[in-house]
Amino acid sequence: MTTFGESHGPAIGCVVDGCPAGLPLAAEEIQTWLDKRRPGQSRFTTQRREPDAVRIISGVFENENGQQVTTGTPICLFIENVDQRSKDYSDIKDKYRPGHADFTYLEKYGVRDYRGGGRSSARETASRVAAGAVARKVMPGVTIRGALVQMGPHKVDRTNWDWEEVGNNPFFCPDAAAASAWEGYLDGVRKAGSSCGAVIEVVASGVPAGLGAPVYGKLDQDIASALMSINAVKGVEIGAGFDAAAWSGEENADEMRMEDGRPVFTSNHAGGVLGGISSGQDVVARFAVKPTSSILAPRKTVDRDGGETEISTKGRHDPCVGIRAVPVGEAMMALVLADHTLRHRGQNG
Amino acid sequence: MTTFGESHGPAIGCVVDGCPAGLPLAAEEIQTWLDKRRPGQSRFTTQRREPDAVRIISGVFENENGQQVTTGTPICLFIENVDQRSKDYSDIKDKYRPGHADFTYLEKYGVRDYRGGGRSSARETASRVAAGAVARKVMPGVTIRGALVQMGPHKVDRTNWDWEEVGNNPFFCPDAAAASAWEGYLDGVRKAGSSCGAVIEVVASGVPAGLGAPVYGKLDQDIASALMSINAVKGVEIGAGFDAAAWSGEENADEMRMEDGRPVFTSNHAGGVLGGISSGQDVVARFAVKPTSSILAPRKTVDRDGGETEISTKGRHDPCVGIRAVPVGEAMMALVLADHTLRHRGQNG
Amino acid sequence: MTTFGESHGPAIGCVVDGCPAGLPLAAEEIQTWLDKRRPGQSRFTTQRREPDAVRIISGVFENENGQQVTTGTPICLFIENVDQRSKDYSDIKDKYRPGHADFTYLEKYGVRDYRGGGRSSARETASRVAAGAVARKVMPGVTIRGALVQMGPHKVDRTNWDWEEVGNNPFFCPDAAAASAWEGYLDGVRKAGSSCGAVIEVVASGVPAGLGAPVYGKLDQDIASALMSINAVKGVEIGAGFDAAAWSGEENADEMRMEDGRPVFTSNHAGGVLGGISSGQDVVARFAVKPTSSILAPRKTVDRDGGETEISTKGRHDPCVGIRAVPVGEAMMALVLADHTLRHRGQNG
Amino acid sequence: MTTFGESHGPAIGCVVDGCPAGLPLAAEEIQTWLDKRRPGQSRFTTQRREPDAVRIISGVFENENGQQVTTGTPICLFIENVDQRSKDYSDIKDKYRPGHADFTYLEKYGVRDYRGGGRSSARETASRVAAGAVARKVMPGVTIRGALVQMGPHKVDRTNWDWEEVGNNPFFCPDAAAASAWEGYLDGVRKAGSSCGAVIEVVASGVPAGLGAPVYGKLDQDIASALMSINAVKGVEIGAGFDAAAWSGEENADEMRMEDGRPVFTSNHAGGVLGGISSGQDVVARFAVKPTSSILAPRKTVDRDGGETEISTKGRHDPCVGIRAVPVGEAMMALVLADHTLRHRGQNG
């Protein structure tokens, strides 16, 4: 997958190459996933109005039955930027916003598209969600679901976990009680012009044993890479993750028994990956999203001319950008698993 | 970098391609780093006796001054396996050891080298340390240091942090008081035939601003991938990492001031990476290592024939494999930074 | 570079990643090169009417002086397909056209976009020309020129070679006398509904010594790969090429002398590449294009149902598709050299 | 595949990654192919005495039946250099040998291993032959054979073609009459201290339809890349190759008929590749090898200090290095086809 596009350029999009032929694919299906990520759906996400309507430019054609299917050639997905609201960028044009990539882009390239964050805008993640929709098609037996498990300092109660609840609140929260409490919390954050971080958990069920590789191309390595590549992500863990560091070998071991003639594990601290290869259990990953850097409170910074100054961000921003990261995390998991599904089939038939 | 070799095969090693020419490189220098990782140096690591003597097979030749330097061609580093102790493998040959890759390798490949873990043995990481020694040469101005910051449930006290202490104890611990306490703790773990996990922090100083890329090939993404690819690693974080999820935008923001005519940051929650590109601050990463899976206490498992059974591991194992992961983490950081140094120079001159 | 798009889909295009920042780039400049390849410019090329108007979707922004420059992020170039003439495809939908990829696409993918050749249409090469225009920007000191040196069985007389002539005839022919003769020849071919092959030579001047690599990533290897990837190309040679097979070592040796204090070669049988690395001489490559497969004369073939039949192609086709391959060959040479320029700078500073 | 090693270093070798597991592989089988390429087998090849004995360092282990099979992990093949004859290199140390990579390596890297050509020595091709032996295992139904079809200006008579003859003469010549004539010709070349070029044809039979890809990753593109990467190769063609440029569309078309219920082609000008994808016909490629650059006749050159001088090469050199390129060409074809076999299986199952 290759993506392109800036927040306020004419369009963003991606090219997915190497996709198997013959998979039914319609723009409407991709749109379903994009709509989950789309801004402006509740008061808790940015009020930028982007329809995020996706067009399939290539790689899909009708088969003998008149159904639109992938042809095996590169699939280009194209999303036009509509709400490029004309505004005054003089402030962010010259000042480095703390937590943003303004300073590092300029240091690296000497020039940057400062409008709405340009290439570093979270808007780029729409391309990932679109590509993820294609990736899901590659693995019809795999279900990938994501949930917000921590908002700011508030974690869900895992004993309340109910995947059905995820669609019932604006936070992708699997715990109805937590969702209810978060509403008040996030309203406070939002009204204060502040922001908070989040932790997202992504679970892939139905992944067959055998995906991955012993050393380079480990499945967990590629998941870590994919999730860490999402904007604002600062940490990734698989299975028990950092908790495992505090455990003993006895506690951490996932023991095995036979069930219906098949070996099964009696726990899943490994998160479905052993030695870089999937074990057939659920693949479980979590990632931490830092608080949105664009906040109302003025922060000290410097400008391009070396002057010390302050900056404060007004406007349409997510108080908790981690919410919309849920479908993005799902998409990245889907892309990694689809890639490894094809690579495994290549090597091992 | 490509590595090869199994724990009990004739040798392990790696090929480093794309290295700049003209860098002085002697086997002795590489050996210095390998010796840090070498087993059998204290009672807290496996008693396997491997000299880990490295040979440079290619890619180095004398320059006009008679000094051994890299020639720009592939560098093959070769480490013979000496202590392939003949033993009875009948137990692990047919039983799946919990926490090990036995089951997943067989599911994927249908065959595996079961001797000492084969390809999934931590022994493979010696190749990484050797390659890392070459990578350090590429960036003479960068210093990469690692430290154990948590052993089992016991964390260091960061106010005691002293890099000098890292070399004064068998744990690479930067806190003398913690090191002292860990000694008794780990003796207990070892005598009980148990094991514990660990967290390692790696810090790269002197990294110039500008390494990395906006979307694919982000610096933090590649660090996450590299660290997660180390055996037994279950989590990776950059800068404030998972802690940032609980913070507000105000707390998380790294503000900027001018100092000696250069923009500087007044904190480093970002861990030296903004938008996937280095900011010139220290690059800070941490990774969690699970407890060694080979323990004395019998664990429930199954065998290849589908029989339910138990397994208990006797023999030469690290009670805390995270200790020897410190030089490995440093090496992986070095490899990622060297790679990005060359890529940045390629793109931006 | 990644390209996408089918002949009769909504658009074709490409994404160029890794381009240095700060290079002035305007759509008009890219258009200049596209116009050289554009169909319908003489009676000797297909009468399909495509404006081939390119849009820059991303990766370019104004710098401090208000000039449009590359930003270092992925550059997406987008060319809409305008002349998707509605026609009856029932004939080529089910019959395999000899010399075309109809049969192999179906064998591989089980489905194909049969309209105008779909992905295998020469139309895809417009994306390459657009990307090549970006590549040229990376190497301001390098001049890349192509010429048709053989049309059907008729070769140019090299003693007449004049680069200025290339722009004076519809064949990119450097020999005015040959161009004149070819006109009558190709009219005959065209009127007979037949076609002919061609040989194109591409010469890059100003290439510094040192581009390439000793074994994998040889400069000549990558040129061969790039040129062979152009539609209808069946052979590639560097320097003396196949002729060198018939020579003695004495004849083939490019001897060296000093000139203005610099080593120079007194001949260039090597075509500017020695041991996979550029020597500072002109890089010279040639490639053979087979005759256009779409011809009026009926050819024996079979259909998807296994019936033996015939096919004859009417319509808008190039009698000598090699003519329009000239700018495509230039673009591919530019892409390879730009890539190696950046890689060389990465490895060797 | 990654190779490493210099002509006069301690060893050369390669690492083959991504090989399917469970393929029987013994060093003896690899040795069989290496022996075909081994020097010193007739008076027509260099008299350097290298046993070229290959060791399998990793990636192979016994399966349940006690048979040595691939395990799916990286296979390292290691060939020690034995005949590193001590000699006086003062001549080639400072002078640039025409046709060799001496000048370009120094321009690129500033340092080189000048002993026996170092990395640019044809000795590196032994690694390729070893890797090719592994690649053949991946495609048990495919037969890959190579033959010398032109030595200096003398071509074989294709009506005499007999694959059985290839093993009956020291030239891999399929035409007994030509082989007999070449003997006298090459004796003359050899005694004169001169050299000649050659053309090699490689034919792969049993390749299923469907290998390759429409645009990047075309099968013929990768074959061209692989063959051009062999030392001294200056041209590559597929099927009719350069001859096709002189033909009409009618002559070039490979017509189709039904045979035993399967579509078949009545000719193979395409060389088994259409639109970058294999057609099920024999894949046919040819490559031109320039005359050995090391010759007795003095050639004009310059030295590192900028002095004009001459160089003449005495010693153990192949008068026609193209002969030993035959097994190398076979190996490269095997590697490309094996790679595409796995990639095709990955994408299309």
Image (cartoon, coloured by chain):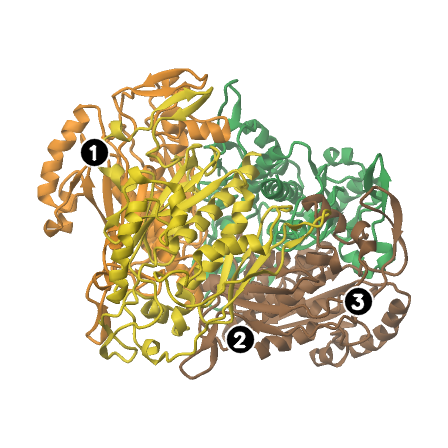
Chain colours: A orange, B yellow, C green, D brown
Q: Position of residue A25 (x, y in %)?
A: 34, 51
Q: Position of residue A29 (x, y in %)?
A: 29, 47
Residue drawn at (44%, 75%), measured in percent from left and top? D22
Q: Tell me if residue C97 comes above or below residue A325 in the rendering.
A: below
Q: Position of residue D121 (x, y in %)?
A: 71, 60
- Mark 1 → mark 2, Cα distance in angstroms: 57 Å
Tell me the kind of residue under disc 3. Asp
Which residue position is annotated with label 1?
A: A41
Tell me the kind of residue under disc 1. Gln
Q: Nearer the viewer, residue C318 or A345?
A: A345
Q: Position of residue A74 (x, y in %)?
A: 45, 49
Tell me the kind of residue under disc 2. Gly
Which residue position is annotated with label 2?
A: D141
Q: Chain of mark 3?
A: D
Q: Chain of mark 2?
A: D
Whether residue C312 is visible: no
Q: Tell me if residue D75 comes above or below residue B145 in the rendering.
A: below
Nearer-N-terminus badge (3/2): 2
- Mark 3 → mark 2, Cα distance in angstroms: 34 Å
Q: Determine the image quadrant of residue B28.
A: bottom right
Residue mark closest to the camera, 3 vs 2:
3
Identify the element where label 3 is drawn.
loop
Q: Tell me if residue C313 comes above or below residue B91 in the rendering.
A: above
Residue mark closest to the camera, 3 vs 1:
3
Residue drawn at (31%, 62%), measured in percent from left and top? B319
Which residue position is annotated with label 3?
A: D318
- Mark 3 → mark 1, Cα distance in angstroms: 75 Å
Q: Is residue A226 left or right of residue A107?
A: left
Q: Chain of mark 1?
A: A
